[in-house]
Image (cartoon, coloured by chain):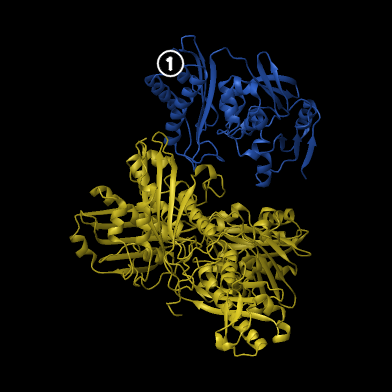
Amino acid sequence: MMRYLAASSAREAAEALAAEGGVTRVLAGGTDVLVQLKAGLVEPALVVDIKKIPGIADITPEAGGFRIGAAVPNAVLGEHAGVVALWPGVVEGANLIGSTQVQGRCTMIGNLCNASPAGDAVPGLVAANAVVRIEGPSGTRDCPVAEIPAGPGKTTLKKGEVITSVFVPARPKGASDAYLRFIPRTEMDIAVASAAVSLELNADGTVEAARVVLGAVAPTVVIAEEAGKVLVGSRLDDATLAKMAAACEAVCNPIDDKRGTVAFRTKTAGTLAKRAAVIAYSRAGGSK
Amino acid sequence: MAFDEYQKRDFKQVGTRVRRPDGVDKVTGRAMYGADATAPGMLVGRILRSPHAHARIKSIDTSAAEALKGVKAVLTGADLPVQDEDFIRDVQDNCMARNKALYDGHAVAAVAAVDAATARAALKLIKVDYEVLPHVTDVDVAIKPGAAVVQDGRTLENVPAGMSENLTSHCEFGHGDPEAGFARADKIIARSFRTAATHQGYIEPHAALANVTSDGKAELWCCTQGQFYVRTLCAAIMGMEASQLRVTASEIGGGFGGKTTVFIEPVALALSRKAGRPVKIVMTRDEVFRATGPTVHTSMDIRIGMTKDGKITAAEAHLRYSGGAFPCGTVDMGAQAAFAAYDLEHVRTYGWNVLTNRPKEAAYRAPGAPQAIYAVESVVDELCQHFGLDPIEVRLKNAAKKGTKSSYGPTFPDIGLVAILEAAKAHPHYSAPLAPGQGRGISCGFWFNFGGNSCVSMNINTDGTVGVTEGNPDIGGSRASISLMAAEELGIDYDRVRTIVADTSSLGYNDVTDGSRVTFAVGLATIKAARDAIRVMRGRAAKIWGIEEEAVDWKDGAAIPAGPNAGKFPPMTLAEIAAVSFETGGPIAGHHEVNVDGAGVSFGVHIVDVEVDKETGATKVLRYTVFQDAGKAVHPSYVEGQMQGGAVQGIGWALNEEYIYGADGRLQNPGFLDYRVPVASDLPMIDTVILEIPNPGHPYGVRGVGETGIVPPLAAISNAVSRSAGIRLSELPMSPPRVLRALGG
């Protein structure tokens, strides 16, 4: 028989999860967990609801950036002018998940912990160098988002650990980001390939720093280091963009499945990175 | 029936956009769909399904499930009778496997339990010992000699010896001497095509509640397109007399042909008989995809010859259709429909049905026609491109018209194809400028339309209102249309008529809601029932006035004296006659029962503009216009809805929808996430142009409109993609990976 616990503190949640010998699930928006339960994919012994933990659904300014609670619905995030202005690419990724109804429930942290290689909220957070705060049996720790995914359906979180918030940092002037995904439809779908690009520009409009992150082309989100380096110093001329796309293709390691072929995912990841870079560049105030 | 039924008239009600009678219930959630049925003491039925594409069932041990507390019945194929007749045996075996599981998702056992959790637990306790057999899920693989044989002994005599046993039947249509025609062509194009199986994608999953009582009577409530046919099939499977099984159809959340047969209904009945309690089964979406009927998947070779001025000299089609693990006749309809839009001297089509380890095909909107016509219209378009000819002009030059001997045999009476092509040519869409990178495609479409058995009762109530009782589930607005035709004929307001769909014990037999038949055939029966009621009312008026019945006419909803010699009486309205009916001979009713012939064929033409993203292979539909002959549009909004709905399903079929099987023979995408029907944001407004070329076989000129609309989109979009991206695809769907690969990406 499945038990349900509405935790009143992160500590209580962590302790309950640590003490449970059977399968556990953490419930925030529930847009993945409830679907898995209904489909019979998982029969947890314990479900811990974290939504009622004080402060866990808050967005708080911190050190020029924002701390976003683990239970903040993506629809609420999308209406937060401060986060949207600072990290538009992070927010647009989060807002692509599901339908309008799902947006009212789903969370970025849920998307991260579901650990699908195709999660739309994850590439943007990784490109932003976002850091999660984790409550666990041995106390509180911070960890880069990039280090959480371990493979399809798997995270690096240890038994009893629960993420309580994610921090997106401050940005200098002349910086922005963008996220694009490819789906065969226009909504209500899962990324076949995706790309997030975060740029910082120099005063002369050249790229000072760039981070390119790809989704759905490997078991976990992929940081395309070389692709980011290619952009530095450029104004995103066509030759640079082509080189960056090639660098993206080089780090893709996708699967062939019902949603797309290896060749399609690889090619499309490069195309999306080019297009996302152009959008981020324009948002950062650059003009080609 | 006389074929000169149609009489020109000025309509007062037919052709207006009246309020739909089911709207309030549906938008407020009060409409009773299949899963809403409930009965005291009702059990939950669930079905165990094969995880294998092809396996011999060596044994099924149900003892642990039967021993579980709360389980009231367990059913396997052994509980059902052995059927002698092929057709019924196939239907039954598809509902519950006997000896072999023939596809992933094939039902092998079922339980009835006190609640869903117990039923689920019981399914896990059933032990099926399978001997997994080699499988085949692709039509082109299945036809090869040496392919795994899905069912042996099913090949008809018209299939030559030495071919794969999966080829079960052959058909051939046409006339003339194609080779002589090809010799006169300036260009012959021969191409091969493949289309994926697609599902009707109705939103409401199948649901049935069965209640078999100990005295042998049974009630069945279910979501179906034809309660009478459900009764026929279930009575045969259950060994019951038709009178003892009453079937009531629920409101229906879509069917598109897929609810014209049974899947869970006999299982619910058999479980209920075994358990002695009502049993309800509701399918999950996963079950709907794996175990109900998608359409056929196909492989086709088309060869067409044309002169340089656009005259088709000869045409030939070889069609291989697979409707899954059981024989089906869908390829015959494809072979008949393929060249229906053309007036050809030399034409031949050949069809083959092929067995594969997939679910048993069910009808899907114009079954068999979209595939063949997609292939034909693609080759015609390629010939137009080759000669630099306008695709509408070429179709006009070769169009079937009144007097044309059709490629499938009959000579056409009045048909609307030329008028539709002319309307499309003259429409602003066809001449609107295109931006660079955009492409415009057109295609013709065709469907036969059916008539069939129809039975209508019409009760004239004493308050002057009218109740119409018909027997076809309302799947596309038929209640509104039938009320409109009743009101028109009686001469009263639409709001005074209410049409209901009766159960099988309340009315004579009605064929299934299919073949675009209901507004045509049931409409005809309604008009005739109204005339019958009018005859009775004229008699009552004659009695009141003391004159002969022949001396009474009916005009504008009232009895009037036929002429000056009949006497001087003020008109007596329907309401006035009805109010005194108890004193003039009793209740007033009209009836009509008929097997309707004379369904007029229906043609359509679609124009579509698309833009292909050459970096991703994604196709965006920019503008879409449907032209279709409705004969007479009884309720234009519903007609437009049918035209738009057909176009949308065709767009999904052209671009993304497909049954995807893995190497293990299992369906990879049994859900709406990865079986991609279009969402609203994928589509432009689908514009519609209704043409009205009266059908001589209907009093008001009505033709069926439900199916033709799904036929043209496949080729229209493929032709538009060709003109946008410079690539000619020959396989559906044109999903982004397939398009990008064709672009060399």
Q: Nearer the viewer, residue B517 or A126?
A: B517
Quarter of the image for residue B228 reads bottom right
Q: Which residue is identified by label 1?
A: A235
Q: Could you say where residue A197 lies in the image, as x and y percent from the top left?
A: 51, 22
Q: Position of residue B78 (x, y in %)?
A: 62, 69
> Is residue A117 rendered to the left or right of residue A133?
left
In the drawing, does residue B606 fall left or right of residue B493?
A: left
The front one of B133 and B120 is: B120
Query: On screen, B178 above or below B3?
Result: above
Q: Quadrant of residue A149?
A: top right
User: Where is residue B163, by image quadrant?
Assistant: bottom left
Identify residue type, mark 1.
Arg
Whether residue B81 appears in this view of the structure is no
Residue at horizontal 33 percent and vertical 43 percent from the top: B723
Task: Decide: is B478 above or below A127.
Answer: below
Q: Give the image location of residue B4, x and y in percent.
A: 42, 77
Q: Which chain comes out yellow in the rendered image?
A: B
Query: On screen, B59 above or below B722?
Result: below
Is residue B7 found left or right of B560 in the rendered image? left
Residue B432 percent across, percent down from the top left: 37, 43
Closer-to-camera residue (A19/B648):
B648
Q: How many marks?
A: 1
Disc 1 packing (10 Å; few <14; some 14–19; many ≥20) = some
Residue at the image point whose x is 56% and y is 89% from the top: B565
Asked whether residue B88 is in view, the answer is yes
Q: Colour of chain A?
A: blue
Between A251 and A34, the residue placed more toward the observer is A34
Q: Could you tell me which chain the residue with mark 1 belongs to?
A: A
